[in-house]
Image (cartoon, rainbow, N blue to C red):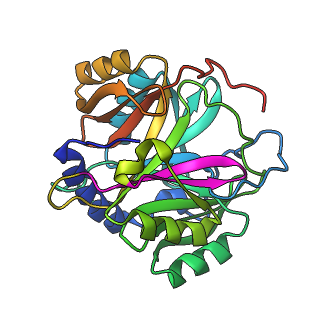
Amino acid sequence: MLSHVNIRISTILRAASLALISSLPCSLLAADNVMPPLNTIPSQAHLSGKFEWADLFTDNPEGEAKFYTQVLGWTSETTTRKGHTYILISNGGETIAGIVPSSAKRREDSVPRWIGFAATDDIGKAIETLNQAGGKTLAKPREVKERGKLAIAQDSQGSVFGLIQSSSGDVPDYEPAVGELAWAELFSDNPKAAADFYSKTFHYQSVADSAHADDNHLFLASGEFARAGVSSSPPWEGGKSDWLLFFCVADASATATKATQLGGTVLVSPHESKHGGQVAVIADPLGGVFGILELETANTLKSTP
């Protein structure tokens, strides 16, 4: 999706990986934690590999919540249960993400980190498969009341991702609304190996992207939908394999400007994607990196599947 990314992304993401690992296990996966179900009305959908939830790990949850609610139009609600604090992020009245207080003490490399959670109908089997494929379990599967089973893992190249086995079924496919998680892109120095790893874990079909034939971009697809993409490593020394999450916005340029006004940094300026729509990459005031995607077909409210 993106062919050139500012060198700062590599530095930030590499540092974030180290900080994240040191902060696990975290309150997100606490056995007595409670999170709302993905679907208020249970669905029968089982969409392996669909990224349907995101969590931001940070040691300044209140500050981050203030930034993101102003930039992306979200609302936040802080919940506390048996000493565990978690901030729920809502968009248009529906919970779409969370902010997790990191247990690591603040240090130079402990920057915030977004993690996307991909669906699986058997989290135990998926963990077993990814470990056999060279991955590593960072937080073992735990049952979270109302939500289902969650785990956090690292792939064979060091990228961190989450797994979710929803107790209410997966979120049905529909065009993303403004404010929702719209895309997940993996930057890798070996796209084919990365695609092979995730295909084993989530039963993806790896599909070559004809619009990016020159840089070996791949789509990870399931259920006739592209769920994520894999790009070659950004062209800088020491570039590291990692995931980048994109949220849907109504106006990429306006969102980038707003983020800058609130202390963020635009790492990649809004520009036209080869697949249509404007994309950009931003670092929040504490260094957490996320992408924004302006789609011509984006809904202002969640549509019926």
Q: Observer-nearest residue: 232 or 144?
A: 232
Q: Write down the quadrant of residue 93 in the picture.
A: top right
Residue found 63% across the figure and 20% down from its top: 299
For the C terminus, the image quarter is top right
Residue 293 vertical placement versus 130 (above, below): above
Residue 152, horizontal then vertical, whole percent: 50, 65
Left or right of 280? Residue 181 is right
Q: Write down the quadrant of residue 79 in the picture.
A: top right
Q: Is residue 102 visible?
A: no
Residue found 35% across the figure and 49% down from its top: 214
Q: Observer-nearest residue: 10 or 108?
A: 10
Residue 185 vertical placement versus 78 (above, below): below
Residue found 42% across the figure and 62% down from its top: 160
Q: Is residue 174 magenta?
A: no
Q: Is residue 226 magenta?
A: yes
Q: Is residue 70 visible?
A: yes
Residue 201, horizontal then vertical, whole percent: 59, 70
Q: Write down the quadrant of residue 150 in the picture.
A: bottom right
The count of marks equals 0
Left or right of 231? Residue 96 is right
Residue 40, horizontal then vertical, whole percent: 78, 39
Q: Main secondary structure of the magenta part?
A: strand
Which contiguous range is marked in magenta? 216-234
Residue 13, horizontal then vertical, whole percent: 28, 54
Residue found 57% across the figure and 31% down from its top: 90
Residue 158 vertical placement versus 132 (above, below): above
